[in-house]
Each structure stands twice: as structure tokens, then as C-alpha cells.
Amino acid sequence: MLYALLSMTLFWNCKPKQEKEDNFEVKYTKTVPQEEKVKEPIPVDLENKGIGPIESLSFPEQIDEDMAANGESKFNALCMRCHMIDERMIGPAMVGLYERRSPEWVMNMILNPDGMLREDPIAKALLKEYQAVMNNQNLSEEEAREIAEYLRTL
């Protein structure tokens, strides 16, 4: 009997609520959320050099293995909190980064994330997409270059 009473109570509470007011029947139902807005893709732009101290950077043909090893160590210590190699996390995946961004842009994002997030259109779009601010790690240009070299190996 208790089971039947409980079942009836649940059934009654789960039904849409109906009221009659002045010859009108009003139905209350749960609202259906609107479809999410279609997000615009983050543009690929190899010409954008970003905002910061790096105006020109061209990588040598061969990867500097020592520099990349130092960069990997720094990346693992500082960047892995937010960036995975091949998966989206708090920030974008790093694999294929130089197919989407110029070396100067990457270096400026590492060295000057605050200025980039304020002024660079791609950095602003990434902020909007990921809803996370990239922290300034206060790296030297040499340290940032080591990370940039490591990112070439991915």
C-alpha cells in the first residue's frame, strides 16, 4: 500500500502541471534548453605574428635536439597543467601547432600572454573558446625558444 501511494505521488509530481483560469487551460512543462550556438572555428593564420617582443623567427631545418629536450622538460613542468599533446584540455592541444600558428605567434603567446589576450584576435578567440586565461610563466626568450623547439617535435 505504501508502495502504491509513493508511486502515485511520484506520478502526480512528474506530470505537467495544469491549471484552469477563466476558461483557459494552462500547462506547465519543463523548458527545453535552446540549442547551443554554433561556435565559429578558431582561424588558422600563419601570417599573424602576435603581440610581443618576437618580430621575426625562422626555424632551422634541423631540430636542435638539446634545445628540444630542455623545452620538453620546461613544457612538462609548466604547460602540462593546461595543455596536452594531442587532446584538448583547459587549453588547446599542441600537436600540429605550427600548422595553425606562426613561430612568432607561439613565442609571443608564451612570453606575453597578457598582451596577446588583450590585443591579438586569435588569442581573444581562443580565450572565448576555452574560457581560460593563459598564465604568464615569466620565461626568458631562451626558455620560450626551447619550448618552441620542443613543440616542433610533436
Image (cartoon, helix red, strand yellow):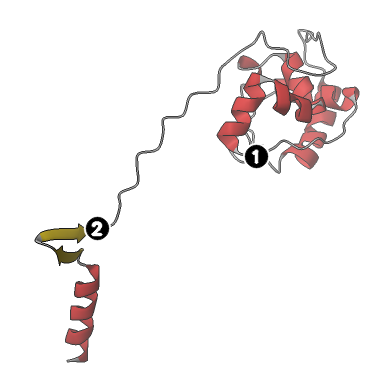
Label 1 crowd bin: few (<14), some (14–19), many (20+), radius 10 Å: few
- Which residue is drawn at the image coordinates 69% and 20% (left, top)? 120
Position of the C terminus by quadrant: top right
> Can I make out residue 109 in this image?
yes
Element carrying mark 1: loop
Element carrying mark 2: loop
Tell me which corner region of the image, top left, top right, bottom left or bottom right, holds residue 112: top right
Q: Amino acid at mark 2?
A: Thr
Res. 29 mark = 2
Res. 50 mark = none
Instruction: Return the residue at label 1.
Output: 132
Q: Say whether marks 1 and 2 touch (CB < 8 Å).
A: no
Q: Amino acid at mark 1?
A: Ala
Tell me which corner region of the image, top left, top right, bottom left or bottom right, holds residue 135: top right
- Which residue is drawn at the image coordinates 17% and 66% (left, top)? 19
The residue positioned farthest toward the bottom in the image shown? 1
Q: Position of residue 125 (x, y in %)?
A: 59, 26
> Can I make out residue 87 in this image?
no
State left or right for residue 11 relative to residue 124.
Answer: left
Q: Position of residue 102 (x, y in %)?
A: 69, 13
Choose between 92 and 11: the one closer to the eye. Answer: 11
Which comes before the other along the chain, label 1 or label 2? Answer: 2
The residue positioned farthest toward the left in the image shown? 23
- Which residue is drawn at the image coordinates 19% and 74% (left, top)? 12
Q: Is residue 62 above or below residue 134?
A: above
Q: Position of residue 110 (x, y in %)?
A: 78, 27
Front tag of 1 and 2: 2
Q: Is residue 27 above or below residue 81?
A: below
Tell me which corner region of the image, top left, top right, bottom left or bottom right, holds residue 92: top right
